[in-house]
Amino acid sequence: MIPPAFDYHAPKSVGEAIALLGQYGSDAKILAGGHSLLPMMKLRFAQPAHLIDINRIAELRGICEDGADVVIGAMTVENDLIASPILRAKVPLLAEAPKLIADPQVRNRGTIGGDIAHGDPGNDHPALAIAVDASFVLEGPNGRRTVKADGFFHGTYMTDLAEDEILVAIRVPAFAAGTGWAYEKLKRKTGDWATAGAAVVMRIDAGRVTHCRIALTNVAPMALRATDAERALLGQSLTDASVAAAAQAAMAICDPAEDLRGDREYKTAMAGEMVKRAIRAAAARCQ
Ligand SMILES: Cc1cc2nc3c(=O)[nH]c(=O)nc-3n(C[C@H](O)[C@H](O)[C@H](O)COP(=O)(O)OP(=O)(O)OC[C@H]3O[C@@H](n4cnc5c(N)ncnc54)[C@H](O)[C@@H]3O)c2cc1C
C-alpha cells in the first residue's frame, strides 16, 4: 500500500518530458493514468526515483481525423474513447471494447497509451490495436518514428519503446464501409483482466471473407496476431468448418501462463472459443 519515495516532475510539453527521461534514464518512469504504475509502486514491484507526470501535456489528449486515419492522443482516457463520436463512426471497435476494460473509475484515469506502453499481456488494447492495424507514434530525442502495432509487443512488459521515448499517439485507419468487428473477452468478473480474449475485424464480399485480422489477449507473454487463423478464413465462406479451422489455428499459437484464471489447456480452449464467437459476431456486423 505504501509506495517508496520519489521526485515528481510535471512537464508541460513532450520535449520537456523527453529531456527529463534523458536526464534520469532508468531511474525515471512516465506517469500516465497511474492505474498500472501506482499499483506496482504500492506493492514495491516498481521503485522509480523520478515520476514524470504527462497529464499536463495538452497535445497528448484527444481524438481527431487526419485524412483516412483516426489519431488518438496517447493520454486519452478509456471513457473518452467510449464517448467519442469519431471512434463510434470510424472505428467502432475502439469505442465499444473499452467498456470491457476495468471499471468506471479506472476508465476515468487509465489511458490508451498507458495500456499499450505497459506491455501487459493481460491488457486489452494491445490485441485491439493489432486487430485494427494501428500504428504507434513514438517520440524521442531524435524526433518521431511510427511503428506498427503488429510487431510492437515483444514479451511481458517488453515493447519497441526505448527508455527515452514517449508514445504520443495511436493512428488507426478508419474502417471501410461494411466492416464487421468484435471483441470477445472471457473474464471471471467485471473489472478483471481476460482469461482469454479475441479481437476480430473482417469484411465479407459476395459471401467470402475478403479481409480479416484476428488478435488474441492474455494467452501468451504478449498479445498475438493470429495470422494462420486469418488465412483459414480469407477467401472462404463462413462455415462451421472454416470457423473451427480458424479457432484451431489460433489455439496452436497460444502459450498462456498458468495462474488463478486457469491452466494452459483451459486458457487455450477458451482462446479458441473466443475466436469462434468473435468471428461470428464480426460477420454478423459485416454489410
Ligand atoms: C482494478 C483494475 C482493473 C483493470 N482491468 C483492466 C482490464 O481489464 N483491461 C486492461 O486493459 N487494463 C486494465 N487495467 C489497467 C488499466 O487499464 C491501466 O490504466 C493501464 O494498464 C495503464 O494505463 P495508465 O494510463 O494507467 O498508465 P500508467 O499506470 O501511468 O503507466 C503504465 C506504464 O506505461 C508507461 N507509460 C504510460 N504512458 C506512456 C506513454 N505515453 N509513453 C511511454 N510510456 C508510457 C508508464 O511509465 C508505466 O510503465 C486495470 C487496472 C485496475 C487498477
Image: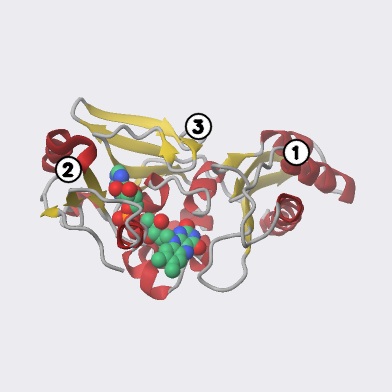
Quadrant where the N terminus sits is bottom left
**Cα–Cα gap, marks 2 and 1:** 41 Å
Q: Which residue is mark 1?
A: 252
Figure quadrant of residue 81 = bottom left
Quarter of the rendered structure image containing ligand 1: bottom left
Image spot of residue 3 (x, y percent): 25, 62
Specify whether 275 is left or right of 165: right
Q: Amino acid at mark 1?
A: Ala
Image spot of residue 278 (x, y percent): 69, 56
Q: Residue at x 80, y 43 (%)?
A: 248
Q: Which residue is mark 2?
A: 14
**Cα–Cα gap, marks 3 and 1:** 19 Å
Q: Which residue is mark 3?
A: 151
Q: Amino acid at mark 3?
A: Gly
Specify whether 241 is left or right of 54: right
**Residue lying farthest to the right in this orientation:** 241
The number of discs equals 3
Q: Residue at x 15, y 43 (%)?
A: 17
